[in-house]
Amino acid sequence: MCQQTIAAFAVNFGEFWLIAQLCTSNSLAKSVALLKQPDILEHSQTLKTHFDALSKLINTMVDVTKCIVELTEIPFKYISIDEPPLSIAMAHIHTATYWIISSVVVCTRQITSLVHYIDFRGMGAINLAHKVSSIHEHLQSRLRLCYEHIDEKKLMEAFAHFKRTIETPQVDNLMILQNIFDKEENLLNPDRAEVYINVLRRKHVLLLISDLDISEEEIRVLEVVYKERVSSGLNYEIKWLPIVDRTTWNNGYQEKFSTLQSIMSWYTVSHHVAIEPAVIKYIREEWGFVKKPIAVTLNPQGKVLCPNALSMMWIWGNSAFPFSSEKEESFWKAKPWTLDLLVGRLETNLPTWVSQQKVVCFYGGVKMEWIESFTTVTKGVANALDIGIEMVYVRKKNARERVKKITGLIKEKELSHAWEDDNVWFFWNLLESMLYSKTQHGKIIENDVIKQEVMAMLGYDSSKNGWVVFYTGSGEMVKANGEKVLSTMESFDEWEKLAKQMGFIPALRKKLEGVIQHHHCTRLILPGNGGRIPERVQCAECGRPMELNFLYSCCAE
């Protein structure tokens, strides 16, 4: 009824209204006014206030009518007319219709009064416009709720469709890839040329999923593995899926997006909104993506082999191809824990040092006084035992800026070797990857030696003090926090005889076991977005269960 009433009003008073509105600014309207409504032209300035009030009311009437039409045309496939929020919105249509018809009557009377200069007394257009405007705002809010409900239903429908598709055996991976992206979406190949998505058909594909905060270190390390695949004779491709918030996108994000694209040597999307919202929902809920990058492996038939293959790529590189969960499990069964598993690819001098039967010491910390004392006394112990020793400063995981000066002093004073940023990042990322890999395979700390060692190392780094690991090629290893090792080294005269009898590392281990610290505070900080968090963690120092707390950090140290 609203539409018919508004239409009738427009037919009867449309010409007058256009003339009245435009006669002072439009030459054609002015000429028509001279012919048809000369009095309006003559009194246009006097009547302007009345025209403005009527104009506001008419515009509001039209807005409310549009809302009513929109509500009646909502697709009932996704929302029930008998349930909120649509049922609540529809309940207000009768009231809105009443006020629109009342407004038309008021406008008609006031326009007639203005034309014939009759004093009309009744509800003013200004007050009525305010009333109708309130109705419009209320209907708009209800309409927004309806559209949000519809969008949610569409999202759930698309989510269910993608879930069925990816969990149903396929002839090849093309349908799954097309469902991830808009079917018309072109990809950018490693040469930055646009190609159709079917170039990935029947290939092993790793879906690299991240937000725009993926670090350059991660990209560089992954690039090494990716480029080595050719020499290894492996046929797989990597495809970057950026997960971004479309509502907050701005020029700064676009610049960051383009920069990341430029340094990636694999396939990327051509546009930041290429990934379907339902797929993003699936990625978060089914594959567990939060913030830390993951790599989902698809075989040529589109079957998911592993929900996150990055851990095994960091640990074993291309030897873990096809990066399946079964392959990861078999590697852990075949590979015992050795420090070589952790640092073999990072310290190029390690094979030489091992062949020379040297003791290798990796250490970290951010207190220069402790570093000088530890390196000096340890070299003194090595000289007293007449053994070769090489020391490597690994530093702490997140203290890059703080330790730049320390690294420079270590090199300047020739206290030891010192790793560069990429190796440091990779070392700690490897430890976290090992923990994540073990955890997702259901390993608990009590019956898994590798997990115990990894968590001990991560616990040392999370503490405020330094940490030390001594290692020999024969597999002997001993580790402890920095203060404990330093005090033990400084009391070397107490166990020198034992060291000459048993050997350096066995004697040091025995001595460290006898050192009981009356007070220690061990922390273990794990990334909350890196996968499942272990339910039970033992202290690396005393073996007691550690309390679980939450730490929110906005930046590195």
Image (spheres, rainbow, N blue to C red):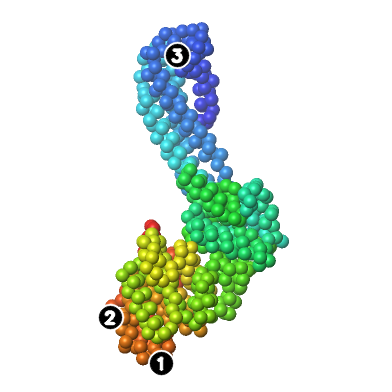
Q: CA distance from mark 1 to mark 2?
A: 29 Å
Q: Residue at x 28, y 78 (%)?
A: 519
275 displayed left or right of 413: right
Residue 523 in view (yes/no) = no
Where residue 276 sits in the image (x, y, percent)? 57, 51
Q: Residue at x 32, y 74 (%)?
A: 373
Q: Quadrant for the C terminus, please.
A: bottom left
Q: Give the vertical position of 369 relative to 79 (above or below).
A: below
- State which tag comes first along the sequence, 3 or 2: 3
The residue that mark 1 highlights is 501
Q: Secondary structure at mark 2?
A: loop
Q: CA distance from mark 3 to mark 2?
A: 92 Å
Identify which residue, 280 or 313, lies in the foreground. 313
- Give the label on residue 24, or none: 3
- In front: mark 1 or mark 2? 1
Q: Secondary structure at mark 1?
A: helix
